Amino acid sequence: MAKSLPDRPFWIESLRKNPALSAAYITATIEEKDPEPELLKMALSDVAEAIGQPKMSPEQYELLLKQLEELLSKQGSDAIYNLGLWLNVLGLKLTVAVATDTEDNNTNPETTISQLTEQNLENAPV
C-alpha cells in the first residue's frame, strides 16, 4: 500500500476550498510537455476526493471513481466527451483556450502532427 504524503490532507483541503485551484491543477497536468497518464489519473482522483466526496454518498463517490477508470481507458472522442461529463459532475468543465504564451505559439505544426501520429500508433489496439 502506498504511503500518503504528509501534506496530502492539506492539499486535498486546498483543492476543496478553491475549485479554481482544482481546475488549474487538472489543466497543468493536461498541458504537460511530456504527459504521463498516471499523473492525469492522480490529478483527477485528487480533485474527485476534494470536490466530489464531501457532496456524495459513499456509493456515489465509488461510482465516480469507477467512471474515472472507465473513461481513462477509452480512446478518441469518447474519452474527451466522457471527461467533460465527468468534470461537470464536480462542477468543473472542459474548455479549450487560445494559446497566448509565446512558447505555446512557437510549436512546429509538422512536429506536433508527427507526435500525435506516434501517440496514436502507440495506443492502437493490437
Image (cartoon, rainbow, N blue to C red):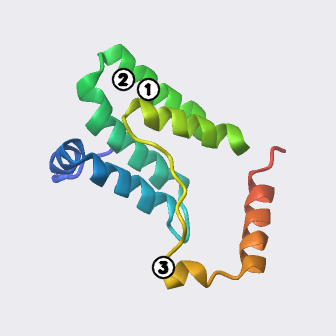
Kindly check if marks 3 and 1 are in contact, taking CB atoms under 8 A apart as contact.
no
**Among the 4 quarters of the image, the one containing residue 62:** top left
How far apart are the alpha carbons under marks 3 and 2?
Answer: 37 Å
| Residue found farthest to the right | 126
Taking the image as shown, residue 22 lies to the left or right of residue 76, namely left
Instruction: Check disc 3 and report the residue beneath it.
Output: 101
* 114, above or below 16, in the image: below
- The disc labelled 3 sits on which kind of residue? Asp
Q: Which residue is mark 2?
A: 61
Amino acid carrying mark 2 in the image: Tyr
Disc 3 to disc 1, how far (Cα)? 34 Å
**Residue at mark 1:** 64
Specify the amino acid type for callout 1. Answer: Leu
**Residue at the image position 59 percent from the left and 80 percent from the top:** 105
Q: Tell whether 80 sits left or right of 39.
A: right
Q: CA distance from mark 1 to mark 2?
A: 5 Å
Residue 110 x %, y %:
78, 78
Q: Quadrant of the C terminus?
A: top right
Residue 91 lies left or right of residue 30; in this view the side is: left
- Dot 3 or dot 1, earlier in sequence: 1
Residue 25 drawn at (x, y percent)? 36, 56
